[in-house]
Structure formats: structure tokens, C-alpha cells
Amino acid sequence: MRKVSIFGATGSIGQNTIDLIARAPESYDVVALTGGHNIEQLAADAQRVGANLAVTAFDARLDDLKNALTGTGVEAASGQAALTEAASRPADWVMSAIVGAAGLAPGLEALKHGATLALANKESLVCAGSLILETARTHDACLLPVDSEHSAIFQALVGEDMGAVERIIITASGGAFRDWPLVDLENATPDQASSHPNWDMGQRITIDSASMFNKAMEVIETREFFGVSPDQIEVIVHPESIVHALVGFRDGALMAHLGAPDMRHAIGYALHWPDRLDLPVERLDLAKLGQLNFRAPEDARYPALRLARWVMERGGLSGAVFNGAKERALDHFIAGRIGFLDMAILVEQVLDRFEAGSGLIDAAMTLDNVTETDHLARQWTDDAMVNRAG
Ligand code: NDP
């Protein structure tokens, strides 16, 4: 039996992971499940998969969790220290699916204990790519991609020599507003941005898909994960979300990965790797699909892609600045305090301020420095809001 833990179990990726694990209960010994506010789901799943431990990230919810688990034999815990402790418990395979920079510390801890880390939490690589990779190397731990694009690239690279790779193309659905006139974007609401044309995901990543901040993060993630240079990474809008990524080789060949937009494919690939086992995902009927479309992303519609290029050129902790500012700007957008287009404007202002006036951006990449940079980036995003109002 493989020992597994799922961080962010109550979210979209977490629920898809539980769906796969619950189909083969004889194969898995579930060490820990973690969640946030969705205590009912966390407690129900912990019982369903027979987890030893359930952790809520929020101390204020511990009593609710304890009540929900009374008499079940599942241990309950809360808070950041408990998340880290859960990640230190021996496990063969750990799903990192907490949303946001909060996913970094537990993922690092799991790597330090030699677990195979299935990484959905792209923020980890954006904020602290070299720290994550170095920790995996030092502790002989394995890092597997779960983002559908990165899983697709990983699969297209099986048996290939990285030296033969010319370029990597990641596809983007274009999100909720891909066909909206540019002038209407200014008034786009959080509700409108929260509806994805193809994928069923958490609210934050869905809005990030509409703004292309999600794709911007994935471009940085591609650079970190596969070690290619920024100019080898291309983004193409592909409204059907059937081709997830393509790898171009020096002989001109392009290897594409196709599949229905269902995250259980990428999760299942990481769960069973290096084997391929049956997965309950739709099989594509290409004749029924008929055609697949591709178009270049418009610069004016997706400023986040330009900012990602800047971050990759700048390096260091600029990814942590980018992500922290993006997360905070997203908080403000969801709360209705700023417009849709303001998110990229705020993030750019924060990046400019860091470039001009913070030694932190060039500081060593340690967890403490990443955390401090993240906090400062959020604070500077709030400052930028105040300055706008003023
Ligand atoms: P969701 O918002 O659906 O779920 C997030 C999970 O994190 C929930 O379990 C939530 O708990 C928990 N959580 C929220 N805040 C905190 C916190 N401060 N500390 C600890 N746990 C917290 O997100 P998704 O599943 O959509 O995404 C998860 C990660 O995977 C993200 O990094 C995303 O970019 C990435 N990803 C997602 C894809 C998708 O299809 N959804 C595709 C590719 C990557 P609760 O809900 O109980 O409050």
C-alpha cells in the first residue's frame, strides 16, 4: 500500500485526487488530508478514505473540525505548524494542491522528507523555483508536474534529450473574456470572470485564466521546471483546451499532448508515474471534434504575459513579488474594490517599486526571504491602491 497525503484536499484538484484514490482503496494508506474553511468536506473525506489526520489551515476552525470528527478515530489539527507537521509525516506521494503561496512551506517540507511531490501549486515554482528544485535534489525527492500543460510537456519529453528541445508551446483557453471587445473588459465583474469556458476549477485560478495571470504563472513554471530559456517558451490561444502543450524539437518535429479537459488525467499520470494505468476520463472523438483552433495572444488583452517575461529576465525573488502582488490584487478584484484591468496595473506598479527600491529582490532564495517578500508585495499592492485613491 502506498502512503499518500493530500494538501488542499477540499479544493478542485484535491477533490479530483480523492476521486481517483477512493476508486482503489486497497492501494492507498492515506496519511493526511488538509483543507481550509470547508470543514464538512474535509471531515467527510477523511472518513471516506480512512485518513489518519485531518488539518484545517485555520485555528478558528479547529473546534468545528474536532466536532465533525468525534468518534471517527481521525486526528484533528489546525494552523501552519500543523500543516508543516503533516507534511513531515512519512508518505510516498504527496499532492500539493493548496491555492496560493500558502502551499510553498508544506511542499518544501514534504520534499525534505523524500516524498514524491505532485505539484499542482504553481505558486511554489513561481515564488521559489530554485529553492524547490534544490530541496528536491538534496533530499533525493521526486517532483512531478500536475498542471495540465506541464504534465503534457513532461509526457512529450519521455525518452527525449533536453538538448534536442527547440521550444515549448503552452496553450491557453483565453479564459472567460477571450472574445469580449477590449473596451468591455474594464467593467468585467468577478462573477463573469469566475466562469471558465472549458475547465471546472477553483475560483481564483478561473479568474487568473480570464486575466492570463494563470498562463503568465505557467510560463514561469515552465522555465523553472524544464530549465529552458524564456525565449524558448511560447503561448498560443487554443479555445478548445484539447491540446495542452507541444514540444518542438531541433528537427522541426512537434510533439503534442491531447486530452479532454479533465484534471484527473494529469493527476492520475502523476499518481501512477512512471506507469500508465486506466483513468476514468473521456476518450476523445476527433471526428466529432472536427477542428481545433489556434491564435496568437493579443498583447493588449493580456498584459500579464509581458510581466511574466520581465520576471523571468529579472530572476531572483521577482517571482515572489509578482505572485504576492497578483494574489493581493485578485483579493481586491474579488471584493469589488478594483476593476478587472486594474489587477495588472497594480502588479506592474509593485514590480517597479521593488526594482527601484528593495534590496530584497536580490536576496538569497530562502523560505524566510520568500515569505518576507510575499508579505511586502501584498503590502505594497495595498499602498498602490491607496495612492490610486489619493
Ligand atoms: P481551490 O480554491 O479549489 O482549492 C484550494 C485548496 O486550498 C482548498 O483545499 C482550500 O481549503 C485550501 N486553502 C485555501 N486557502 C488556504 C490557506 N491559506 N492555507 C492552506 N490551505 C488553504 O483551488 P484549486 O484546486 O483550483 O487549485 C489548487 C492549486 O492547484 C492552485 O495552485 C492552482 O493554481 C493549481 N491548479 C489548479 C488547477 C485546477 O484545475 N483547479 C489546474 C492546475 C493547477 P478550503 O476550500 O477548505 O477553504
Image (cartoon, rainbow, N blue to C red):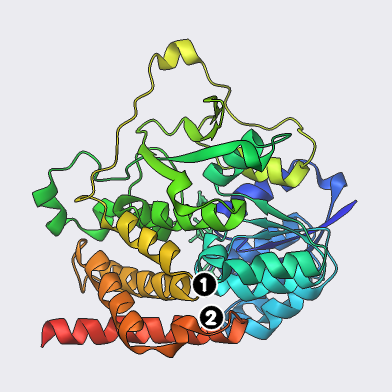
- Residue at 37% of width from left, 33% of height from top? 238
Q: In front here: 62 or 168?
A: 168
Task: Name the side, left or right, on which 31 lies relative to 299.
Answer: right
Classify 209 as above or below 115.
Answer: above
Q: Name the quadrant of the C terminus.
A: bottom left
Classify 128 as above or below 92.
Answer: below
Residue 316 pos. (x, y %): 50, 74
Q: Secondary structure at mark 1?
A: helix
Q: Secondary structure at mark 2?
A: helix
In the image, the residue with mark 1 has its CB under 8 Å from the nearest atom of ligand 1: no
Residue 330 pos. (x, y %): 33, 68
Residue 324 pos. (x, y %): 42, 75
Residue that numbered label 2 is attached to = 370
- Residue at 39% of width from left, 43% of height from top? 235
Q: Which mark is residue 14?
A: none
Kindly indicate whether the residue at mark 1 contacts the one at mark 2 (C-beta within 8 angstroms).
Answer: yes
Residue 90 pos. (x, y %): 85, 68
Task: Name the side, left or right, on which 309 lies relative to 169.
Answer: left
Q: Amino acid at mark 2?
A: Val
Which numbered disc, 2 or 1, marks the residue that appears first in the sequence? 1
Quote the CA–CA distance across marks 2 and 1. 9 Å
Q: Amino acid at mark 1?
A: Ala
Q: Which mark is residue 101?
A: 1
Q: Is residue 264 visible?
A: no
Quadrant of res 247: top right
- Residue at 46% of width from left, 10% of height from top? 287
- Residue at 58% of width from left, 38% of height from top? 165
Quadrant of res 323: bottom left
Dot 1, crowdedness within 10 Å: few (<14), some or many (≥20)? many
Q: Spot the residue most to the top.
A: 287
